Image: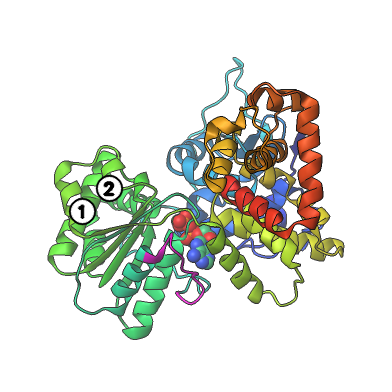
Amino acid sequence: MGVTRIVQINDRLSDDAGADSDAGHATPAEAAWVAIRTSLRKSIGARTFDGWLKPLTLDSFDDESGELRLCAPSSFTANWVDTHFRDHLLQAWRAMLPGVRTLIVDGSVDGTRPIASDGETVQSVAAPVAAPIITASESTPFEPRYSFDSFVVGKANEVAYNAARTVAEGGALAFNPLFLHGGTGLGKTHLMHAIGQDYLARQPGARVVYMSAEKFMFEFVAAMRAKDTFSFKQWLRSADVLMIDDVQFIAGKESTQEEFFHTMNELISAGRRLVISADRSPQDLDGIESRILSRLSWGLVADVNPADFELRLNIITKKLEAMPQASVPQEVVMFLARRISANIRELEGALNRVVAYAMLSGKPIDMEFTQATLADVLRANQRRVTIDEIQRRVCDHFRIRQAEMSSARRAREVARPRQIAMYLAKQLTPRSLPEIGRRFGGRDHTTVIHAVRQIEKLRATDAELDADVRLLMRQLEG
Ligand code: ADP
Ligand code: MG
């Protein structure tokens, strides 16, 4: 398809970039940009967003190279956005469009860089749009959708969930701080918003402050510039509950890091509740002093793990309850839960996309429609299963030795599992038939074809065998 040039789509967006009446004609990149802007505004706060990110426009997306270009009104803004929001933006983009590989923030609108007479690009030094003078700061408002009720609990997240509930209940503190960590899109922010809302519902009038670490940095730097860090600190210290999201963005940035952790220390000493999240454990955060590390680890460090199939299925089912207008067959639900395993944000995004596209196009949601609509997401979620892994799993399952995969024995109890393994190798890996044959004791490709046909036939008639195959597929695809 090549490069899509996008002409000032931002002009068409409403202020909070919510509804896009033109969604029917939007390219996937345009549609993603609308959603990303809305969610960024929430996650980093209206002021930071309006000051730095709102002026950005979507320039182009090249779906072959995966290069995405954004334009900022000045190179100063471009620089700032690049240093402070690059990870965040890239993460948000990849969640919506997994094909995005590189992100470039250009310093002038529409690629028409001002050219000086000597041909050099002019370095614009225009100030950012919003004057960043902040004293008593605002906290990001909570997202009503992110409640404890809407959070689906499973093995992967039950420790984090229970800890979050304990913090929200506001009783005596058994641990402080609560440090939530886990990969992106697994529900950390959701839990923090849930804590905030639940706490406020129990103790109206309490001061609950929630901020992304980026916003924290932005506010702190602004306070420093205005030579008024005092009121910023006072404001933080007056919080009953302070929650800072994604502190990996602070780690390594010296002045902010130091300030942040000092403030945190004081809050802990003063018995304030503190909740921190990061995409990795305290030990893995770069450049954090050991003194601070040990303080962090005094509290409860709870990890949020990737959801297993069952949890993914429960989450989709729950989300669908909230969309009674969407009719999604169970087959599609199972397919999504099985195939979109990277994280919950992607799973949710995929479901939303299927439902939205079906509505816009008036088509029913079936397997074909789902696969076509989600082609890029599905590709990105494809786990690389190896033949070795398949052989190991199959042998485990049927309790035979792995050497039987290559042996010449034809006894049913080893021949059938061997055929199943060949079938799975054909279904789940991109290997060719001769290659598969070679990995099974140098068998001929016609033997592999025979095995594949045999298992296909048996799956239709032998329920037990079919259940074995399904189970193995699920295990292998994670
Ligand atoms: P993180 O902060 O860990 O990157 P988020 O909290 O932003 O992830 O979660 C991404 C999306 O997935 C959100 O829309 C959230 O509501 C949803 N989500 C994550 N975990 C769950 C869960 N256990 N139940 C319901 N929704 C979830
Ligand atoms: Mg988050």
On residue 282, the disc is 2
Residue 42 visible: no
**Picture quadrant where residue 445 is located:** top right
Q: Label 2's element?
A: helix
- Which residue occupies the foreground of this view, 359 or 174? 174
Where does the image place residue 117, in percent across and percent down from the top left?
61, 18
Residue marked by disc 1: 297
Type of amino acid under label 1: Ser
Q: Is residue 238 left or right of residue 88?
A: left
- Which residue occupies the foreground of this view, 439 or 441? 441
Where does the image place residue 415, in percent across and percent down from the top left?
67, 38
Q: Residue at x 82, y 54 (%)?
A: 368
Where does the image place residue 223, in percent across and percent down from the top left?
29, 53
Q: Which residues are magenta?
A: 148-158
Q: Residue furthest right?
A: 362
Q: Pointers 1 and 2 in contact (CB under 8 A)?
A: yes
Q: Is residue 154 magenta?
A: yes
Type of amino acid under label 2: Pro
**Picture quadrant where residue 315 is located:** bottom right
